[in-house]
Image: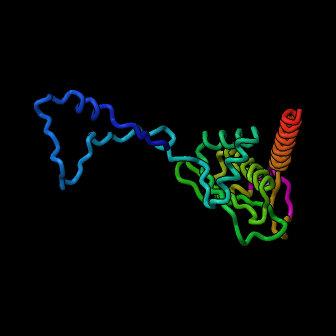
Amino acid sequence: MRLSLVPGVCGLAVLLTAPVTAQHPLPARSFEPSLPAVAPQPAPPVVEWWRNGGPRIRLTDQRLGPALRNGVERSSLLRGLVDRIEASNVFVYAGIDPRMIKGLAGRLVFVGSAGTHRYLRVMLHPELGGDQMIATLAHELQHVVEVIEHPEVDSESALTTLYERIGQSNRAGGLQGWETNAALDMGYEVRRELNIGTAAALARREAAKREARN
Ligand SMILES: [Zn+2]
């Protein structure tokens, strides 16, 4: 939420319309505590998303902030996922699991539900590199969208039932789990978008260098 730093218009208007006789010259030196010249600003209006529970994607590890920002700037698919989740009633706590076993890049856990709100946790492997982390996050957020599309999922067992139906069983990292083609495709496609964007940026840089030499 952005807060305005512009002084309150009401307070300014009061100062401008104050009668001249009410003005007192300041003493040359004063030890009076300084008081604000402008009346306190009224609280800014609360925006809709805040009234409705706040942002849906909440990062629990600061390493994910740059990855998400960078990914949203470079991948329209990831932007679409984020928009979809922010418009939903599913809250996602996304972080990094330092104890995640080898062979797993990420995982999704059902945390709980309260009324129409549902809560999930997405955990990523700590050794994922820059674009790999973005693509894995997109993969896991596609799983979040799968939960959004199935409002009947309101517990860990209901999540398992959903993936038994729409996913394929696997034993990544030696653990029983499930995977979907949609999430696999999302990870690949986001990675492709990132690669194309990187290649285009390099080509533009080379073209600019050639231009500068000529
Ligand atoms: Zn998956």
* Residue 89 sits above or below residue 111 on the image: above
Taking the image as drawn, is residue 129 in sight? yes
Is 162 included in the stretch rendered in magenta?
A: yes
Residue located at (68% from left, 60% from top): 109
Image quadrant holding the C terminus, namely top right
How far from the left and from the top, in percent, is residue 115? 52, 49
Is 166 included in the stretch rendered in magenta?
A: yes
Residue located at (56% from left, 49% from top): 117
Taking the image as drawn, is residue 189 in sight? no
Magenta segment: 161-171
How far from the left and from the top, in percent, is residue 211? 86, 32
Examine the image and state in which quarter residue 65 appears.
bottom right
Q: Nearer the viewer, residue 27 or 89?
A: 27
* Residue 208 sits above or below residue 174 on the image: above
How far from the left and from the top, in percent, is residue 192? 86, 44
Q: Nearer the viewer, residue 12 or 174?
A: 12
Examine the image and state in which quarter residue 127 appears.
bottom right
Left or right, 3 with respect to 93, comes to left
Q: Nearer the viewer, residue 42 or 28?
A: 28
How far from the left and from the top, in percent, is residue 135? 79, 51
Q: Nearer the viewer, residue 60 or 41?
A: 41
Left or right, 4 with respect to 38, comes to right
What is the count of numbered marks? 0
How is this picture coloured?
rainbow
Examine the image and state in which quarter residue 106 appears.
bottom right
Considering every residue shown, the one lying at the far left of the view is 21
Left or right, 141 with respect to 56, comes to right
Residue located at (27% from left, 35% from top): 11
